[in-house]
Image (tube, rainbow, N blue to C red):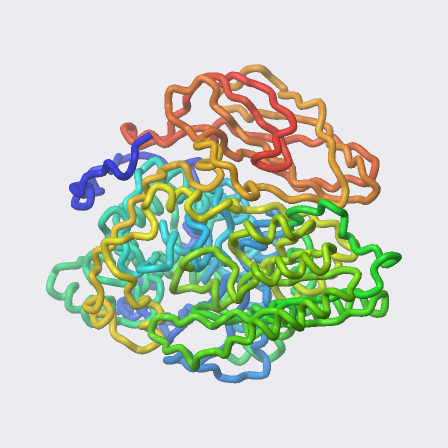
């Protein structure tokens, strides 16, 4: 395995065009449905002036790019996602229009959806967003957000799906199909390797070709090749020396040639850096302005620096999407309330199946109302709404049930419920913004009140974690510690009442070294959307049996995770610059931003393939909770694992079956996971990799046969020498379990 730290800086200057292999077919010979609109697009282009063509290649309003009014081609209208349809704003600002119809459903955020391990739910999630986008007259949804969760502190971990490329890919396909089957184009983001928020507008990511192909690109590839994604958003950062919005390797070679992408690429807001390189290397639309692809592009064409053939090609790629997506007339948009009961039900289903039971040692859950007559609910997050906050996309939620509201709704008069705030999370300053006013330290008084309430209760529900100010676009967390003296409070609560259930309302890993020994029961409840409080309460009382699984690893300490262990994050060669998006909102020009930063930050992905659980397994580092972990109110027995054959060839699928028995007294879902371990490999691999999974419903006391399949094609590695996928022959061990660390059965086959 090549170590990124050994890359010389000459790689930075290497022309990635040297990687071209003319004639290589897209993987799986993907042919986009968008190709059917080529003749129609050509007819329109033949009638357009150069000025009309260039007008389509940049922002018209904050979330709109130009059509061709003279020829009846509608504007392209973007919906800021990826977990809600953003409220309507003034055309050239971030100010709300304060409509009465644009309140939407707040869907659980990305890591919550990932915790369901359900492509089927991802499809429904995408469908729900598309339905609401259509009510608002939108053509393209800015989502799904599918970058790999490389660091536990990542500011957008809550938006992204998983640390694992296979799980992310399956969810990306479901989400994309759900959106596009219902009349809206997706815009996959952020392409590519946007795995940190600090300095995202300047950082240069150096990653090996193999790590890119096997870890960071598979979610994008699957969404393009399998789900025929119509749109892609170029990320802010550089990759191997080139800005993503003008990266020939990413946009022309990989996306368009290797994968057969026929749609359009838009920049992230303020993420365009050039005229000639951007238009030649695959960017279709500069958003939201026209600094580079407006008059400057017209001048470049007239001067001969850009051929009109290139302009025609970029316009054609936009028109394909425009013809595939039926525009909504302005008079039919925003005429009724966006949020609908059907979408609220989808949000509930995702939330209910995402909640992860980390531990339940003394069976405090589900709540036994024969023993529990008084419940103390403690924590600021019990009453805090998570639809908005921090920087970036939020939701003007029609309704959001907090944990406290859900508990009151579901428990009703079955038990007395008392509340204490317990802690207060300080507001952290963000780049470009001043801290409002120093907060008064009320922690002692809040703790005293909480302890008094807890002491007299039969059960304590401590609701802690993070909020949207802590986990936010534009900046990564400095650490994973719980804020607002939560650790001290949990420790004190456990001393006055051992019947303590800790509920983590957080969408990324947090440090549990204090919480773990103090709490016999721990749940992860995410930023779980409009129905999150009701879903949580249903799990607490047993109306819903928990079935979520962690989509990432909880480390014992932050330094155990790969990017920190290798010293490749945080970068130390430049200070944290003002965030590019925050500067844009503050109406600073891109030149002002770039001139004010060192623009030299380099992120060497030194862990290479060993992202997430791959690192912990390969390096024998024990996590706090492993990838894929999640308990239930029942238990499951795995038996009789069989493969249909002993040897499989390149074009076959490895087919396995086993018996899954629910050995408890309640019906429940189990997410079964199949990993691959290479036994006699000469190519270097992680110790094991997820290659199949399924969410299976089993009635109490019953058994079902479960079948899983792994296409041998998906066992290939990316050969940097051959610029192609290659299959290593030999024995592999199939590891079947309930998490990456809880392997129940295994068998071997030959490839």
Going 83% across and 55% down the picture, which residue do you hit?
A: 368
Percent x, y for residue 232?
Answer: 40, 55
Residue shown at 58% from the left, 76% from the top: 103
Kindly indicate the quadrant of the structure image that contains residue 320.
bottom left
Foreground of the two, 386 or 712: 386
Q: How many marks?
A: 0
Residue 250 vertical position relative to residue 50 in the rendered view, above or below: above
- Left/right placement of residue 518 relative to residue 585 reads right
Residue 441, given in percent of the width and then of the height, sits at 51, 75
Does the image show residue 14?
no
Query: Which quadrant: the N terminus?
Result: top left
Nearer the observer, 588 or 722: 588
Q: Residue furthest left?
A: 303
Residue 190 position in % (x across, y down): 39, 55
Is 407 drawn above or below residue 366 in the view shown? Answer: below
* Residue that appears at 72% across and 69% down: 453
Depth check, front residue: 176 or 444: 444
Of 554 and 138, the residue lying toward us: 554
């Amino acid at each position: 395995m090549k170590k990124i730290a050994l890359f010389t800086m000459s790689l930075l200057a290497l022309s990635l065009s040297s990687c071209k292999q003319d004639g290589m077919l897209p993987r799986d010979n993907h042919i986009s449905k968008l190709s059917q609109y080529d003749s129609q697009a050509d007819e329109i282009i033949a009638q357009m002036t150069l000025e009309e063509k260039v007008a389509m290649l940049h922002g018209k309003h904050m979330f709109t790019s130009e059509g061709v009014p003279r020829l009846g081609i509608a504007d392209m209208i973007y919906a800021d996602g990826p977990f809600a349809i953003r409220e309507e704003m003034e055309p050239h600002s971030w100010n709300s229009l304060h409509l009465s119809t644009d309140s939407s459903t707040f869907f659980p955020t990305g890591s919550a959806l990932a915790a369901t391990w359900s492509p089927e739910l991802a499809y429904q999630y995408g469908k729900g967003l598309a339905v609401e986008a259509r009510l608002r007259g939108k053509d393209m949804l800015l989502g799904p957000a599918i970058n790999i969760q490389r660091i536990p502190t990542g500011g957008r971990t809550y938006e992204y799906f998983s640390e694992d490329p296979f799980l992310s890919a399956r969810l990306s396909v479901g989400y994309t199909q759900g959106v596009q089957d219902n009349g809206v184009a997706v815009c996959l983001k952020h392409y590519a390797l946007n795995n940190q928020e600090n300095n995202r507008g300047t950082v240069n990511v150096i990653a090996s070709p193999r790590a890119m192909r096997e870890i960071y690109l598979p979610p994008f590839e699957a969404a393009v090749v399998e789900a025929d994604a119509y749109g892609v958003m170029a990320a802010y950062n550089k990759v191997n020396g080139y800005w993503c919005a003008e990266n020939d390797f990413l946009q022309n070679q990989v996306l368009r040639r290797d994968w057969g992408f026929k749609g359009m690429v838009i920049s992230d807001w303020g993420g365009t850096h050039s005229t000639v390189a951007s238009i030649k290397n695959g960017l279709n639309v500069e958003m939201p302005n026209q600094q580079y692809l407006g008059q400057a592009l017209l001048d470049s064409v007239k001067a001969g620096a850009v051929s009109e053939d290139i302009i025609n090609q970029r316009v054609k790629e936009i028109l394909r999407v425009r013809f595939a997506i039926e525009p909504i007339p302005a008079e039919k948009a925003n005429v009724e309330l966006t949020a609908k009961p059907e979408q609220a039900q989808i949000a509930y289903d995702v939330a209910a199946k995402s909640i992860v039971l980390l531990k339940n040692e003394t069976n405090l859950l589900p709540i036994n109302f024969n023993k529990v007559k008084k419940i103390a609910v403690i924590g600021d997050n019990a009453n805090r709404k998570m639809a908005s906050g921090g920087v970036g996309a939020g939701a003007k939620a029609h309704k959001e049930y907090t944990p406290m509201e859900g508990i009151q709704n579901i428990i009703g008069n079955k038990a007395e419920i008392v509340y204490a705030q317990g802690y207060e999370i300080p507001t952290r300053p963000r780049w470009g913004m001043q801290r409002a006013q120093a907060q008064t330290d009320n922690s002692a008084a809040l703790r005293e009140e909480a302890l008094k309430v807890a002491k007299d209760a039969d059960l304590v529900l401590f609701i802690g974690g993070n909020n949207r100010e802590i986990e936010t676009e534009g900046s990564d967390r400095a650490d994973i510690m719980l804020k607002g003296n939560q650790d001290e409070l949990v420790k004190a609560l456990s001393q006055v009442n051992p019947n303590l259930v800790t509920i983590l309302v957080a969408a990324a890993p947090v440090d549990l070294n204090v919480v773990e020994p103090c709490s016999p029961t721990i749940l992860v409840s995410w930023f779980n959307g409009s129905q999150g409080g009701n879903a949580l309460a249903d799990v607490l009382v047993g109306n819903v049996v928990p079935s979520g699984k962690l989509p990432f690893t909880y480390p014992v300490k932050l330094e155990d995770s790969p990017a920190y262990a290798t010293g490749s994050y945080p970068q130390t060669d430049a200070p944290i610059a003002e965030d590019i998006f925050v500067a844009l909102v503050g109406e600073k020009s891109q030149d002002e931003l770039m001139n004010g930063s060192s623009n030299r930050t380099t992120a060497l992905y030194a862990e290479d393939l060993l992202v997430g659980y791959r690192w912990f397994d390969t390096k024998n580092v024990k996590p706090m909770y492993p990838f894929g972990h999640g308990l239930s109110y029942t238990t499951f027995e795995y038996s009789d694992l069989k493969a249909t054959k002993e040897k499989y060839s390149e074009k076959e699928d490895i087919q396995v079956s086993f018996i899954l028995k629910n050995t408890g007294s309640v019906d429940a879902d189990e997410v079964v996971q199949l990993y691959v371990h290479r036994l006699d490999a000469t190519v270097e691999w992680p110790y094991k990799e997820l290659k199949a999974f399924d969410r299976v419903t089993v009635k109490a006391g019953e058994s079902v046969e479960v079948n899983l399949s792994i296409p041998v094609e998906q066992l290939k590695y990316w050969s940097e020498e051959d610029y192609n996928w290659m299959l290593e022959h030999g024995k592999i061990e199939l590891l079947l379990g309930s998490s990456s660390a809880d392997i129940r059965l295994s068998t071997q086959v030959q490839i």
